Amino acid sequence: MKYTSFRSTSGYESVGALVDNDTRIMDVGSRLPASTAGLSPMRRLLEHHGATLPTSAEEFLGLPGFDAATVEILPLVPDPGKIIAAPVNYFDHKAEMNEDAHIDALGVFLKAPTSVLAAGRTVELPYTDRRFDQEGELAFVIGTTARNVTASEAPNYIAGYTCLLDMTMRGGEDRSTRKSFDTFTPVGPFLVTPDEAGDLSTMRLQTRVNGELRQDADISALIWGVADLLAYASSVMTLHPGDILTTGTPAGIGQIHDGDTISVEITRLGTLEVAVSAKTAVACPTKGANRGPKPPETVTPVARR
């Protein structure tokens, strides 16, 4: 089953399940308990069902529905408590960045929850004088509170999988700073339940900029897979429903510019597409441009399969 956050033409916001070959959205949020904490409908869905979201369209019979073509897709989880990201989690990306360490020495880092962006929207570049790159990634959403879980237990805490772009400013500033600008975490368009996502080892990630293939990788090439990443993160901090964990990017990162279109496609998860704009960009106030790992001048060639 696929879920998404949406807004109707009347301004009504909810969470829905896609049915009829993704042409219709059933308003699952209409039958959820109200939240006294001001949680988004998606967070309320996860709090209510945990990591066992309904997986059959029959469970939504009788609910109001919307034509999928008429609604506005919102950020998948509009209000994640945390976005936890994996640095250098593919060996080919380690090589292209000339990094001397990968995830097993670096751990994880946090992105600002306010950086989420919906599919179909626009990444806003903040500065005119800094380099910005695209990083396509597989991400997953926590459904059940997790603390000190083992890798073998990890699947029991995952509500579903999705596509994510970890937009990045290059330089010597802290990772969390360089990746936390508003609009720098496009995510979605769907949360795909584990039964429909299927075997992660058979997934393939492809990132394109203006239609040109930049990244092409098998998810099986991750250094730390989904289970190991979740287990480690839960040993550092408590994971709550709605937290997003993203698994890192493969080789093929490259500079993006005003007017570009970026897409990330992952097997069985759909395609996340966003535009890029620098219309509101200003000069950068920090001095890290010539520090930190040096990305290649040109995009790392994609191995054709």
Image (cartoon, grey):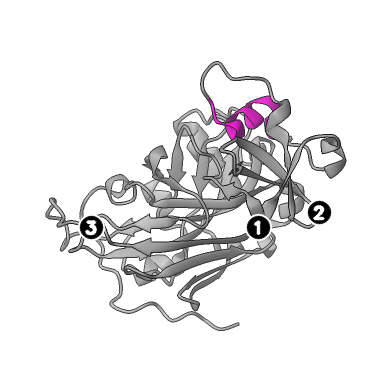
Residue under the image location 25 percent in, 56 percent down: 280
- Neighbour tally class for label 1: few under 14, some 14-19, many 20 plus, Cα within 10 Å: many
- Whether residues under marks 1 and 2 lie with C-beta atoms below 8 angstroms apart, the answer is no
Q: Percent from the top left, x then y, of residue 176?
A: 32, 45
Whole-number angstrom distance, CA of label 1 to CA of label 2: 16 Å
Tell me which amino acid carries mark 1: Leu
Residue position marked by numbered label 3 in the rendering:
281
Whole-number angstrom distance, CA of label 2 to CA of label 3: 42 Å
Among the 4 quarters of the image, the one containing residue 295: bottom left
The segment highlighted magenta reads 39-51
Q: Residue furthest bottom?
A: 304
Disc number placed over residue 20 in the picture, else none: 2
Depth order, front residue of 210/169: 210
Q: Tag 3's secondary structure?
A: loop
- Neighbour tally class for label 3: few under 14, some 14-19, many 20 plus, Cα within 10 Å: some
Residue under the image location 64 percent in, 52 percent down: 70
Q: Is residue 149 something one can see in this rendering?
A: no
Residue position marked by numbered label 1 in the rendering:
269
Mark with earlier residue (1, 2): 2
Tell me which amino acid carries mark 2: Asp
Q: Percent from the top left, x then y, of residue 125?
A: 30, 58
